[in-house]
Image (cartoon, rainbow, N blue to C red):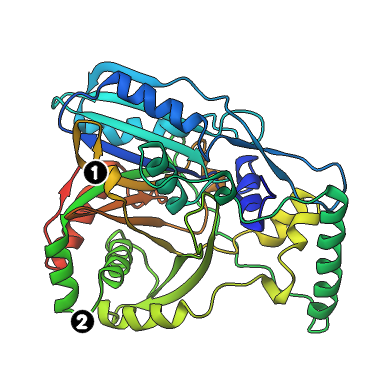
Amino acid sequence: MGRLSVVDEIFLRTHRGLGTPIALQGLWRTGDRIDPQLLHDVHAALRIGPLGRRVIRPRVPGARRSWQLNTRAYPLVLIDEPIPTTALMAWADTQGADLDPEFGPGWRLSAVALDDGGSLVSLTCSHTLADGRALVLAADDALGGTSLTAQSTSSSAPRSDWSDASRQWSIVLRGTARALRHGIPNQPRQATPRNLASGSAPTHGAILQCAVADWDRAAAAQNGTANSLFISLIANMLWASGFQQDTIAASLPVDTRDEPRVDNDLAMTDITIDHTDTPSTIREKSRAAYEHRMSSPGGMPEELLQVIPDRWAYRLSKGAGERDILCSNIGTLPATLRTLGPHRCLGVAARAIHPGLTAAQLPRTRLSGYLCRIADDYLLSLVSLDPTAIESSTALAGLAQQTVLNHGLHARAW
């Protein structure tokens, strides 16, 4: 099944406590009670799908870790006792616990009844297994959409540990020698420690739903695109929350896959936003940024992170992709995800959550946004990582709705 990429291993280290823990989550909200048998069928499909794998360690120093098939899964979680719709985000936040991409199941499927007569279905997986787009592809595969072969779940061809180690060391030694001719590289900027009240929750989440026609109209009115409007909204939400800096650094993930494939196939770029920026100027800044992806510090070969001990690799790359905000545009979701069997979905959202995150692990990022389109709606998922500025999910939803309104939009909070 191939070898882990540099990005895969970065997220594996976060799973081990070296960095901000991250899990990906897809959420389906239905207007009626979900059929348990349907979810059992989806669960069975996921077990043998591209998320059904785990990490195994190499036997030779310098060789990359490998993927191995793993059909063991957490049991399907079905909660029949309805919870209030006001508590659905809090419930969703708990579904990333105990995911283990190395020694145990790295994904979980669960569902809970809502007191409005509907249901909320959650699919979570460790970020080691997949990025946001990959989770969408895995769900599409399990729901009978585009079928993914074993070959399409990894871009790294199998090779022996000895052969892989030889290749890795050759790349690292040559690349490091070239990079050091320019001096010792600087480390990425580190997060400033934040003092939080005892017991305060590190993150809060909210989801807003907006008609595509309205969103696109607002973007066009400001000579922007759906994506640049999205970035503008996240930046202005951060300022509205009390962020004191005159500029905001935005991290922008870029999907780099050339075919449907379930892995971490992404690169990062960034832009700087100031108070004068609009969706129009952000559009131009983003267009230029997408041509210049982030690289390893000082031109060091990224493969270096795979041949040195994990703690060294963590120190060398700590904070590399972190900026003040994260704006991840996951794109248009497949039509397969609009329904779950006979159940029409009122909305489908995708985001990242941070199971087990402590105040000491808070990254530089203060606010993360995730945008996806399903049918005639955009779903904007928000995760605040600044509990001092945003004290609750309700406060985050209210802040988001006001910011959206300031951009000429109306959106409904989940």
Residue occupying the point 71% across, 76% down: 299
Could you tell me how far apart the alpha carbons at marks 1 and 2 are, in whole angstroms?
Answer: 30 Å
Residue 163 in the image, given as x and y percentages of width and height: 85, 55
Q: Is 275 left or right of 109, judged from the image as shown?
A: left
Residue 26 in the image, given as x and y percentages of width and height: 36, 41
Residue occupying the point 35% across, 52% down: 389
Above or below, 183 relative to 58? below
- Residue 397 vs residue 243, the one in the foreground: 397
Residue 242 in the image, given as x and y percentages of width and height: 32, 61
- Say what amino acid the circle numbered 1 marks: Arg
Q: Secondary structure at mark 2?
A: loop
- Residue 80 vs residue 243, the one in the foreground: 80
Residue under pointer 1: 338
Quadrant holding the C terminus: top left
Quadrant holding the N terminus: top right
Q: Earlier in the sequence, mark 1 or mark 2?
A: 2
Residue lying furthest top in this view? 81
Q: Residues within 10 Å of mark 2 (few under 14, many from 20)?
A: some
- The quarter of the picture where residue 330 lies is bottom left
Q: Is 25 left or right of 112, judged from the image as shown?
A: right
Residue under pointer 2: 223
Above or below, 325 relative to 174? above
Residue occupying the point 14% across, 78% down: 221
Contact (Cβ within 8 Å) of mark 1 with mark 2? no
Residue 233 in the image, given as x and y percentages of width and height: 27, 65
